[in-house]
Amino acid sequence: MGAGSRSALENILAYATGETRPEDFEFYLTQNPEFWEQQVSFLGNGHCVPLVQAACGAPVTMLWRKGPWVRANPAIPRGTAIATFTPAGRYANLDTGNHAAVYLGETSEGLMVVDQWQTRTPARPGRRLLTFRGGDGSPSNDGDAFFVILTPRRITSEELRQAWLSLLS
């Protein structure tokens, strides 16, 4: 769990439009998504975000940014953290109409994910298909509404030290 490699992010971004530079961002994934769908109860408060944070190491939603569209992007690795976003590129974090999940793959009908929500029966994470609905209905259930979760890349202490040294010389 944790940030994916820069080369994987470069491959994902190759299918995106825009000016997102892979050296400025991180994405999150779990190496074992099946482990998370075998949990016997909800993670955290049962909303979708605690599962994605626990499984993939994603940080607080305030840091999340809208990355590449998931549909038709074969470079997205299994286990990647995905979510719905506002037009401004932020995670809405409302009670309904937004969602986060762990990506398993794509079929002709939709996106296969591991997710959880408070009213799910049985009350635990599970696998489901988010069908492609083209914007009809709630984005939470529309495979067309999901994007890779990106966050600004964290600067390591060594990078910070090098930056200070370059300023002093």
Image (cartoon, helix red, strand yellow):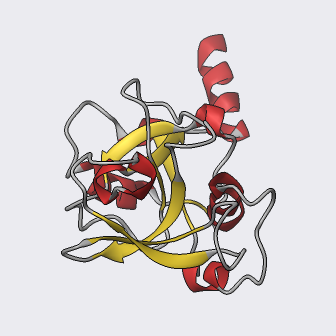
The percent coordinates of residue 16 (x first, y second) are: 22, 45
Asked if residue 154 lies left or right of residue 6, the reply is right
Q: Splitting the image into 4 quarters, where does residue 119 fall?
A: bottom right
Q: In the rendered view, tell whether residue 22 sits above or below residue 53.
A: above
Q: Residue at x 34, y 64 (%)?
A: 76
Q: Residue at x 77, y 66 (%)?
A: 43
The percent coordinates of residue 86 (x first, y second) are: 42, 31
Q: Quadrant of the C terminus?
A: top right
Q: Toward the viewer: 109 or 28? A: 109
Q: Quadrant of the N terminus?
A: bottom right
The percent coordinates of residue 45 (x first, y second) are: 80, 56
The percent coordinates of residue 37 (x first, y second) are: 62, 81
Furthest residue in direction top, as rendered: 168
Q: Residue at x 38, y 54 (%)?
A: 9
Q: Residue at x 68, y 80 (%)?
A: 122
Count every numbered label the image shows and give the total: 0
Q: Toward the viewer: 135 or 147? A: 135
Q: Toward the viewer: 153 or 94? A: 94
Asked if residue 83 lies left or right of residue 41, the reply is left
Q: In the rendered view, tell whether residue 136 sits above or below residue 5.
A: above
Q: In the rendered view, tell whether residue 164 sits above or below residue 74.
A: above
